[in-house]
Image (cartoon, rainbow, N blue to C red):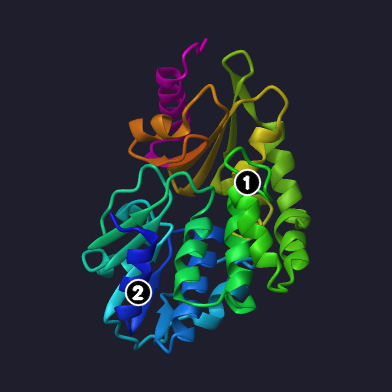
Amino acid sequence: MLTVQETAALLKTFDNVLILTHVRPDGDTVGCAAALCAALRALGKTAYLLSNPGLTDSTAPYFRPYEAPADFLPDKVVSTDIATLGLLPDNAKLYADRIDLAIDHHPSFERFGRENIVRSEAAACGELMYSIVSELGPITAEIALPLYVAVSTDTGGFIYANTTASTHAVAAALMNTGIDYQTVNKVFFRTKSRKRMQLEGAMLSSAEFYDCDRVAVLSVPMALMERFAATESDAEDLSSLGPQIEGVDCAITMRELRPDVWKMSVRTGSRINATEVCRILGGGGHAAAAGCTVEAPWLEAKHRILDAVAQIAPDFT
């Protein structure tokens, strides 16, 4: 496993670099990829981000300036915020066996790169990326803005339990470069489309509660998305809704990706380790935020995730 200094030294030897982001890209994977791309270009390197079909309206502006042309042939491939090869988008799978450097912060990271660096104590991969690009050269506003997106979004606007003093120190350093962090905060944390609000209302009205009301299950079937003509942008980070319910310390958001294919997003408090829950079903993540995919009809899929919670929760009733 590489150190930050070793990772920076390795990156300085790279050129013609293609950077990969994960399926259903969030602010952390996009922000890290964009910041790394900007930092490499500042060194005179050729670097691009592989196109990702899952971009939302909020993440796309930070991604598009660095998107690779269709005919780009890389000499080196780097992944950012990807814990397992199963999280590669379809167009990235052809690079699965030639990832030269994998950069991640998940405890479930599978070390699939030829070289790897992981910092599981980091609240966001953006924290680790900040340390790496700081070794490559000055942190310009162009680099700092996507990094702020990465750190702020993966901590829920600096309110999640994974937020530390180091997280705030990184954010402060990024803000000091003169970036427009106010717009980032407005877009990601204080703006919702009407369709998003309709989705949230429907999810709450059909929510189910278990384990003395400490476990909540919120469902987003494809039919619900179709009912409101909602887009991926409307559905971004729906998993943040359940944990806001008073008394709930384990919120499960079931999102139907394809018929009878459910993406489970598990958000927990200290009583239940979300990674251990999702690992039972082939997934992973962090102690308080993890995910997995279950292929089954809704009722069976719900029973599977609840059974997994019951195996990990010390006092599930």
Q: State the quadrant of the N terminus.
A: bottom left
**Position in image of residue 104 (x %, y %):** 40, 55
The type of residue carrying mark 1 is Ala
Q: Which of 33 and 64 is in front in this view?
A: 33
Q: How packed is label 2: few (under 14 Cα within 10 Å), some, or many (20 or more)? A: many
The secondary element bearing badge 2 is classed as helix
Q: Quadrant of residue 232?
A: bottom right
In the displayed structure image, the side of residue 313 where residue 168 appears, left or right: right
Q: Nearer the viewer, residue 241 or 2?
A: 2
Residue 165, which numbered label? 1
Taking the image as drawn, is residue 243 in sight? yes
The boundaries of the magenta stretch are 292-317
Q: How packed is label 1: few (under 14 Cα within 10 Å), some, or many (20 or more)? A: few
Residue under numbered circle 2: 11
**Position in image of residue 71 (x %, y %):** 34, 88
Q: In which quarter of the image is residue 240?
A: top right
